[in-house]
Amino acid sequence: MQNDNFRRILRTVEALSDLGPAMTSEREFPQTARVMLSAILQAGGAREAVLFTFTDKPSLLTSIASDGFALMPEPAVIPLLPKHVHALSSARGPAVLSGGSSENFLSSNGNVAPELFRCLAPLKVAGKLVGVVALGRREGDSIYDEDDLQSLALLCHYVALAIHNHSLSQTLAQRVSENLRLMASLNGFYDSALESFAAAIDVKHVNIHGHSLRVGRYAAAIGEAMDMPMNDVAALRSAGYLHDIGKVAVDKRLFAKATSLDPEEFREMADHTIVGHQIVSGVQFPWPRIAEIVRWHHERADGSGYPDGLVAEDVAMPVRIIGLADTFDAMTSERPYRERMSFGSTLNEIVRLTPQKFDPAAVQGLLLQIRRDAVGSNRTPFLEAHMSENIAATDIDHLAATLQHKVSHGRLFLT
């Protein structure tokens, strides 16, 4: 008996040691679900198991991973009646099923027979049902005893948290996508609606208020200076409004940090490009490149950007323009970790980094719009009135000449 107890404890500890790295890794959630299920099988000494997520309205269990069952459909789906949801939510822990007791927890109206299961473990977070672990036969066809149920309950606490966190991120992305789809269908109010959405994206941090709006307007103005067609200019404006949409999933504390981000924090912040791409990919925009702009606006010509390390030849011109507009606004705006740079210093730095990081034609368009502001020839000012500062047209002309010299004599000046 003592040896059996020791083996149970050892299995549980081993399963917990497997769960930690699985739940904190960067792998896709279906892979994480399979690792969690493997840990449950190991701890419970089970031969068969399936992991379900729970969704409400309608109440439904949907499998995300299974192991050992010969004829388990993918996905297995079990609709639940209110009495089933109540029974699962009220259960104090894993329950052994015998006779017809499965009908107390599960409906027989799905595509899998509840009679296959010998043990159920509801997954709950703060008393709210988020999923279910269903176990089939054990090794040697023995029944699940109290010690097995205790080990299972311990593991299921961590599994429930993982499923809950995944569901929250999925729900957030789904709601944002649904809102975008709705706005995309309202052609008459399209631009103003996206402006409102851009303001909402930046609400997490006072120091970036207006950032997405300015990036959209800067990008559109650069496109105009490059004589791009008006439809392409409209696309740039909308892409600029949405370029940081993935930041809705970034922890707010990172925006207020007064020191440099550590590598893990930087990776979390950088992932906003991938999250944003996932959000907008399902939206039918009038312009074809919104999703790739959202994903790649931090790519740079020399391959030093993220998330895919693309080089200039791989990056479309609209992406390069958004990247430049984003950089220009970030450098000329105050951040918790530094003061804002002057327009003169910012333009000097951008020209210095062109063409290694920025597109020369886009930078030329930026300089042209700021020069028009300087001489008062812009019908609509490029820079907001409260942001204007004294920068002479002759200084901008000098920068434009330096840029042209670098580009036309690139072999001499790119060292």
Image: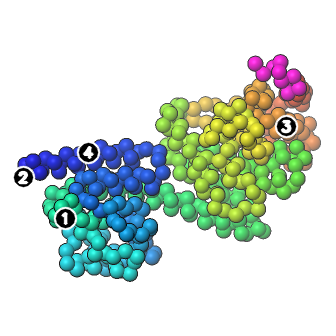
Res 344 seen here:
no
Give the residue at x 82% y 39%. Answer: 362
Residue beneath label 3, please? Answer: 361
Mark 3 vs mark 1: which is more N-terminal?
1
Distance between mark 3 and mark 2 Cα atoms: 78 Å
Q: Quadrant of residue 94?
A: bottom left
Give the residue at x 61% y 36%. Answer: 335
Distance between mark 3 and mark 4 Cα atoms: 58 Å
Q: Secondary structure at mark 1?
A: helix
Q: Quadrant of the C terminus?
A: top right
Give the residue at x 56% y 63%. Answer: 175
Mark 2 vs mark 4: which is more N-terminal?
2
Give the residue at x 88% y 37%. Answer: 368
Per the rendering, the mark at residue 1 is: 2
Distance between mark 2 and mark 4 Cα atoms: 20 Å
User: In this image, 86 relative to 62: left or right?
Assistant: left
User: In this image, 66 relative to 259: left or right?
Assistant: left
Mark 3 vs mark 2: which is more N-terminal?
2
Q: Which residues are magenta?
A: 406-415
Amino acid type at circle 4 is: Glu
Q: Quadrant of residue 45?
A: bottom left
Q: Secondary structure at mark 2?
A: loop
Q: Secondary structure at mark 4?
A: helix
Q: Relative to 312, does residue 291 appear above or below in the rendering?
A: below
Mark 1 vs mark 4: which is more N-terminal?
4
Per the rendering, the mark at residue 14 is: 4
Per the rendering, the mark at residue 141 is: 1
